Amino acid sequence: MKKENGLFRSNGTNYMVPFVLITTLFFLWGFARAILDVLNKHFQNEMHISITQSSLIQVTTYMGYFLMAIPAGLFINRFGYRRGIVFGLLLFALGSWLFVPCTEAGTFDAYLFALFIISVGLVFLETAANPYVTELGGKNSASSRLNLSQSFNGLGCLFATFAVGQFLFSDNGGNVEIPYVILGFVVLVIAVVFTGVRLPEIKHNDGLEEKAKYGREPLMRIWHHKFFVYGLIALLAYEIAEISINSYFINYVTGMGWMDDRTASLVLTGALAFFMVGRFGGSFIMRWIPAEKMLLFCGCGSVACIMLVLMNFGRISMIGLLGNYLFEAIMFPTIFSLAVRNLGSLTKSASSILMMTPVGGCGFLLVGIIADDTNMVVPFIIPLLCYITVALYGFGLTVHREEHVDED
């Protein structure tokens, strides 16, 4: 009998090798995105800019996702997952190496251009890898499988904040181009590996396979799936909250007078360790607990944690801040997998829409404005509202699931 719900098998086909290869990509973009949280404080120190000005790092990067997600989806629909991944890796490497002339130019705008090129590469990677993992096996294990891959995204974040943070905030100060040049070479090697491997394309017998290659009709059809639409809203809310907190973390703990920049980058590394543990643990737990219920529980947990931060009990607020990393860890992969569930040939097009949501990182601009105009605590109102939205999505899906169980 063919296995349908195993972690790596669907319809009797073993997808272990492609799963492992794709999972390496999650580490790469986790590393690239986590560096941004260190760059904020680094550029504030080196170029003497405000929190609001440094937030342009997030705005520029995540606008790349918003502008290029649909083109990336159309490219992947037409040419397949593997070519989309290779193209994304090449852009990633190019953007990393642009940090060399950027350092020579010495202007903030030059760095923003390089970060934009990197973001375009990342959106190709994420638009391909996230839905691909959900399809490498049975539907019931999709959330668990994507959480497992996303755990290595957390590992990349942890390594970036520790290694790059300690390098840039050392006593002598590090040159920002060095980690990017190294990263560019690593990414190029991985691109070469992917040019020589065969990634199986997942086929769907739903009559939309050929139409999906040209994008327009599938992009219109997915809006008729209400849980995709609700998932899009929930994912945008999550991205606003997660990116804003990560980007604001070092500013918050140093602005409260609790520690210096270098210590703060170490604490952020510890917070991302909680995040990684949360994803590994969530992937394991969701083998037995439905993804919808897990999302509802974690959404409520994040709401409670951020409320503790807003109560401003001094250093006790750190418990809420760090605890939030544990609860929010499963949100992106779980929302994503639930939003694309049962979409068949529409999956790639749906993924391209969902990958526009990192534009929520531009929410850090609002966080910076609020922090500069009020105090260091008030900006946490924004992630609070976002986590409430995520919890409501989990609640709606849980109710829907239970209603259908009762009907059966």
Image: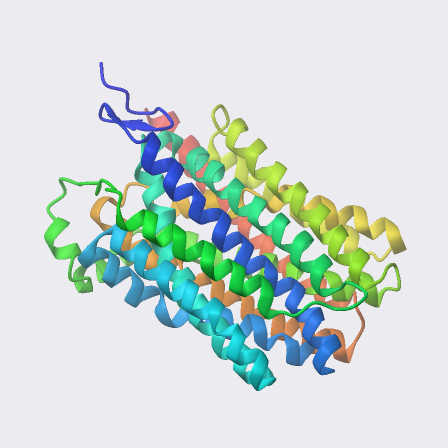
Query: Going 89% across and 64% down the picture, which residue do you hit?
Result: 257
How many numbered discs, if any? 0
The coloring applied to the image is rainbow
Query: 32 above or below 144?
Result: below
Q: Between 215 and 160, which is closer to the camera in this rendering?
A: 160
Q: Is residue 396 left or right of residue 217?
A: right
Q: Between 237 and 50, which is closer to the camera in this rendering?
A: 50
Query: Going 27% across and 53% down the picture, which residue do you hit?
Result: 348
Residue 392 % position (x, y): 53, 48
Residue 82 % position (x, y): 27, 50
Query: 148 above or below 184?
Result: above
**Residue 305 in view:** yes
**Residue 65 in view:** no
Q: Between 231 and 99, which is closer to the camera in this rendering?
A: 99
Report which quarter residue 46 is drawn in.
bottom right
Query: Going 54% across and 35% down the picture, which residue do you hit?
Result: 294
Residue 59 % position (x, y): 54, 74
Q: Is residue 161 left or right of residue 145?
A: right
Residue 110 % position (x, y): 53, 82
On-image quarter of the N terminus: top left
On-image quarter of the C terminus: top left
